[in-house]
Amino acid sequence: MGLIEVIANDRTGTKVRVKVDSEDTVEVLKKMIAAQMGTDWQKIVLKKWYNTYKNHITLGDYEIHDGMSLEMYYN
Amino acid sequence: MADAEGISLEETNKIRISLGLKPLTDNKAPVADKEKEAEDNFANAQAREAKARNDKALRDKIAKVRNRRELNAKLTGATLGDVGDDDGDTLSWVKKSKKREKELAKKRQQEIEEMDKQFQQTYDEKDLAGLKVDHDLDGLVEGEEQILTLKDSRILDNEEDELHNVLLAEHERTKDRIETKLKNRAYTGYDDDEFQEGHAGMRRKVLAKYDEDIDGPQETGFRLGSNIAPTNAARREELAAPKSVNTTLLTIDYAKNLDTSDYLQEGDIGFKKPKKKKKQANRRVAESEVAPESQDNDAMQIDDGPSVNLETNFVDDDELQAALARSRKAKMKKIPKLTPEEIARRIAEERETEALNAMKVEEEVGLVIDDTSEFVQAVSLDAKPERRVITLQTVKQEESEDEEMEEPEDGEVDPKMEEEMMALKMELDKQFGDEEPVKREDDEDVQVGTAAEKTHSTGLAGTLNILRSQGALQATSGDLRDRERTQRQQDLWLADQRARAALRDLERAKARGGNQDQQQREYANRLREQQEARQAAKAFENYKPDVNIVYHDEFGREMTPKEAWKALSHRFHGKGSGKMKTEKRLKKIAEEKKMQAMISGETPLGMTSAFQARQEKMGQAHMVLSVGNRGAAPQLGQYVESPNLTKPKAEKKSKKTKEAEPAPMIDVTHFVAAAASTLVAPNAPASTSTSTPTSAPPRAKFAPVGSFVAHPASGESSPVPGGSRIALSLKRKAEDDGTGTPPSKRR
């Protein structure tokens, strides 16, 4: 358990910095991003290259560390 | 890259709480903790591994040491290199060796004693019991001394000890060799072996040389102390014994006259007698029919005795006998011997019977009187007057025909004719009594006035005639008549053919009944066949069938030859025409159908109804279709008609525009002049003065028209090309109407 900061960037002008716990799931991360951006969290797709992060897996398991940036897409 | 917007921890926590998650704390220690733990774990694991490695190395070392110690333990005691107790001086070594020598001697002594003990035991019969001797007992003659030795045998095969005598063994071997030589000889077919000594009655086997290979060597010899096995000689005797028993069977003596008989003896097993089948009834009937005749006719009477006698005498197969008898009888029947006297007698008999029959018939007719005969008589009595009537009628028919010929001035009756008629009547009256006049009068009535018209009462032909005269029935064309004629001929021919067939059948039936022999029948058949062939050739001379093949398509239409050919071709090749062609054809058929469905005299565009409508409107019975070389004429309808008449629109339009001003002035009856004026007025106002006088009655014929035309053509261009055309056609109209029409009203 530890506080980390993740940067989500869709490369069209939205870049969000979110504080989350490393034991939170990707779903929580999405919810946080959505709360900051003001969108529906279910519209967000987080990716790193060709890996799409799944909702039920924790950030720690995905080895998402402090200050990492993720690619954000919408569906 | 622009800095990402972030929010503070407090705000984040607020959101987290609102999402139902626990708030974040700012300590990053736990992460470090975890890393440390992992490091610790790693260190621990490494330490454990190192320890395990050490342990193993130690254990190996210990094992090695122990092993070495064990090895060393075996090597205790003095070695060659070691200096023993004796410190190498010769004396002590000598002493020692002496001592050793003694011990060895002692040991050897002991062994020898033991062996002696063994050998001292008695070797007698008991020891020999069960030992096998390799010879047959008959080789060992009693009383003679034989020295038996142990036979050589292989150690590895673990063979039993066997005793044998070398000489005897040699002897046996030679015997064997001879035997095998004998056996190996190929089969000669003489079979002499069985007569050789010692082989009597023993037939040589076909492949005797292989017996040993197949069955294995024959076991010989015996065991000491056991029951004595049978000797070879004894065995041979045993084999020979049954042969001697059989000798009686081999005798050639036989009872010369053995009691044999063809007949079943008592106690013999015989054949089962087959049941007699009932012969077919019809065959028997036929036989019975034919048989008496032949017997009657035949001078040589042949009794049926043989078959009967056979049965009594030597019957061993009565079925066969019966069959033979039957065939004999049939043969007898087949060739009746016809002598001339025979034939003559037969003919005489036939005549007699015929005469008798005729007499009988006459007698019967004379005797019997019943109502049928009476009726027949009555009919025959009446027959004469009937005939008379018929003749009269035929005469009258002729007369009436004559009358008709002269009828044209109908109603009037020739006085001369009248006289003739009367004379004829008188004559007839004289002839047939007075039943006739009435009829005569009737006939006269018929001929008078409208009644002369033929009625339908004369029958179908009469009716047809009437219809033909009225034109209701078309006279048949030449072609149709030809076809009818051929058809009639064909019918006739068919009828002939049928009659011929019937006749032939009748003949055949007749021929079948007759009693002819095979030859005659065959001859008759040949004759008939020839005749038939000739007849057929003749009959088919004028065989002209009326053939008219008609093909129908799938809609039931009759197809033209071309269409039929196409359809057949398509069916043959298994493929039809393409989509376009099929559509075209279907369209054509549909059109045809529509055409047929339409009222007769109507065109697909409804021309007739249009014309009728026009006629109603115009009040004219006629209609001008086209006038002039351009094929366009002004029509009355153009001025009166509503636009639904079928005429070029451009013309109509131009007409209307021009009519706009003078319209109220136009009188339908003078429309030609009016039209002319309308044409002229706007174009050449200067010429109006000149034209006014021209419209006078006498010039209306055609002079003014020329001037009309000339003006627009020579002067300015006409307003509408249609205008000039109308002017041209006006010329004709003017010719027609000019005379009758009064001068046009001009303004």
Image: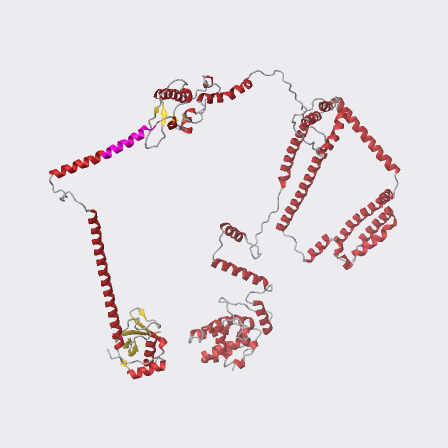
For the N terminus of chain B, the image quarter is: bottom left
Question: Foreground: A23 or B679?
Answer: A23
Tell me if I can see residue B131 in this picture. Answer: no
Percent x, y of residue B525:
66, 32
Residue B33, given in percent of the width and then of the height, sits at 26, 74
Q: Quadrant of residue B517?
A: top right
Asked whether residue B110 is drawn in magenta, I would say yes
The residue under the point 58% across, 51% down is: B550
Front residue of B10/A74: it is B10
Assess whether residue B43 is covered by the magenta stretch. no
Instruction: Give the percent coordinates (x, y) of residue B483.
Output: 63, 48
Instruction: Tell how many labels.
Output: 0
Q: Which residues lie in the magenta part?
A: B106-121
Front position in the image: B259 or B2: B259
Position of B502 relative to B23 (above/below): above
Vertical order, B23 against B496 (above or below): below
B113 to the left or right of B131: left
Q: Nearer the viewer, residue B171 or B303?
A: B171
Query: Is B671 rendered above or below residue B258?
Result: below
Q: Main secondary structure of the magenta part?
A: helix
State the scheme by which the image is colored.
secondary structure
- Do we see residue A39 in this rendering? yes
Query: Which residue is outermost to the left?
Result: B89
In this rendering, would B201 be left or right of A36? right
Where is residue B691 drawn, in percent x and y? 49, 78
Residue visible at 32% across and 31% down in the picture: B155
Q: Is residue B530 left or right of residue B55?
A: right
